[in-house]
Image (tube, helix red, strand yellow):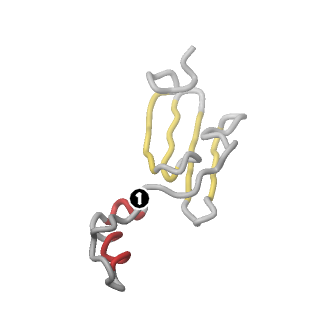
Amino acid sequence: MAIDPNYLPGKWYREIFWNFRNPPTLFSRTDVLEGIPTWNPSDGFWFLVHKSGLPFLSYRGKHIEFYIGWRPSGAFGIAFRHANARGSEKVH
């Protein structure tokens, strides 16, 4: 998010203070991994590391699927559900 031009204009610490106003936003998004799927195409575990070093781990099996970390879209997320639950890409 861009810094508000009216926030501490001319101060050297402006950017530092802006980013620490809401610390969770520092880690809420990272680079986007275009063309990389969220799930292992062959099922099983899938581990990714963004250019920024932030991790993503997912697992999809016959009965469950879960993920934790910074998804390929760049957003942080956590999910744990039955493989055929609403929200699952496996629902037919």
Give the left or right position of residue 70, taking residue 7 as reference. right
Give the left or right position of residue 9, taking residue 74 as reference. left
**Residue 75 screen position, x and y as percent:** 48, 49
Q: Within the image, what quadrant is residue 12 found in? A: bottom left
**Structural crowding at the residue carrying mark 1, measured as other residues with C-alpha within 10 Å and reported as few (<14), some (14–19) or many (≥20):** few
Which residue is depicted at the point 37% across and 60% down? 25
Which residue is depicted at the point 45% across and 51% down? 76
- For the residue pair 65 and 27, the one nearer the viewer reads as 27
Residue located beneath label 1 in the image: 1
Above or below for 42 versus 12: above
Q: Amino acid at mark 1?
A: Met
Which residue is depicted at the point 66% across and 46% down? 34
Q: From this viewpoint, which residue is outermost toward the bottom?
A: 12
- For the residue pair 16 and 70, the one nearer the viewer reads as 16
Quadrant, the C terminus: top right
- For the residue pair 9 and 31, the one nearer the viewer reads as 9
Q: Within the image, what quadrant is residue 31 found in? A: bottom right
**Residue 27 screen position, x and y as percent:** 43, 61
Q: From this viewpoint, which residue is outermost toward the right?
A: 42
Which residue is depicted at the point 62% across and 38% down? 39
**Residue 15 screen position, x and y as percent:** 38, 75
**Residue 9 screen position, x and y as percent:** 30, 77
Above or below for 56 versus 62: below
| Number of marks present in the image shown | 1
Give the left or right position of residue 69, taking residue 23 as reference. right
Above or below for 31 versus 35: below
Q: From this viewpoint, which residue is outermost toward the top?
A: 92
Quadrant, the N terminus: bottom left
Q: Secondary structure at mark 1?
A: loop
